[in-house]
Image (tube, rainbow, N blue to C red):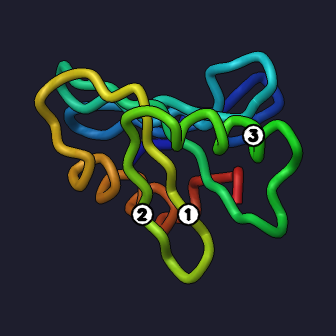
Amino acid sequence: MEMLLNEYDMVVGAKFDNGTIQDYVDDKNTYGLVRIEDSTVNWFLYNEVDSDDDSKKLYEDVIKKEHFIHDEFGEKIVLFNKVGKITFEEFIKKINEYIDDGLGQII
């Protein structure tokens, strides 16, 4: 993965062979976007104890509609607004690679 930097040289996402990950795409900086080929999904990390109020509200809204949650010991990767043929599991794999590479700055 190749990191994407903002004007302050902070990591804000990554590019990989068939897609991209962005940490934030909304005005409140609560969720990001993953694109793999022609499929997309919004995503964010959620922890019931440590998440801010905007993330908690987003979580409550998201779980009322189609979504996917991958829980790793209380730290949840929440996916929603999926478009395309790529499975939720494939998106989770890319997000985990991004986080494991130390590129994700939203943890």
Amino acid found under the numbered disc labelled 3: Met
Q: Position of residue 106 (x, y in %)?
A: 70, 51
Q: Earlier in the sequence, mark 3 or mark 2?
A: 3
In the displayed structure image, the side of residue 28 where residue 81 appears, left or right: left
Element at badge 3? loop
For image coordinates 18% across by 44% down, the residue present is 87
Residue 92 position within the rendered picture, expressed as x and y whole percent measured from the top left: 34, 55
Q: Which residue is mark 1?
A: 76
Residue 76 vertical position relative to residue 13 in the rendered view, above or below = below
Q: Is residue 48 above or below residue 41?
A: below
Whole-angstrom CA distance, mark 2 to mark 1, is 6 Å
| Residue at mark 2 | 70
Quarter where residue 89 is shown:
bottom left
- Farthest-out residue, front: 64
Q: Earlier in the sequence, mark 2 or mark 1?
A: 2
Is residue 12 among the parts visible in the rendering?
no
Q: Which residue is mark 3?
A: 10
Looking at this view, name the residue that lies furthest to the right.
53
Q: Residue at x 68, y 36 (%)?
A: 58
- Picture quadrant where residue 46 is located: bottom right
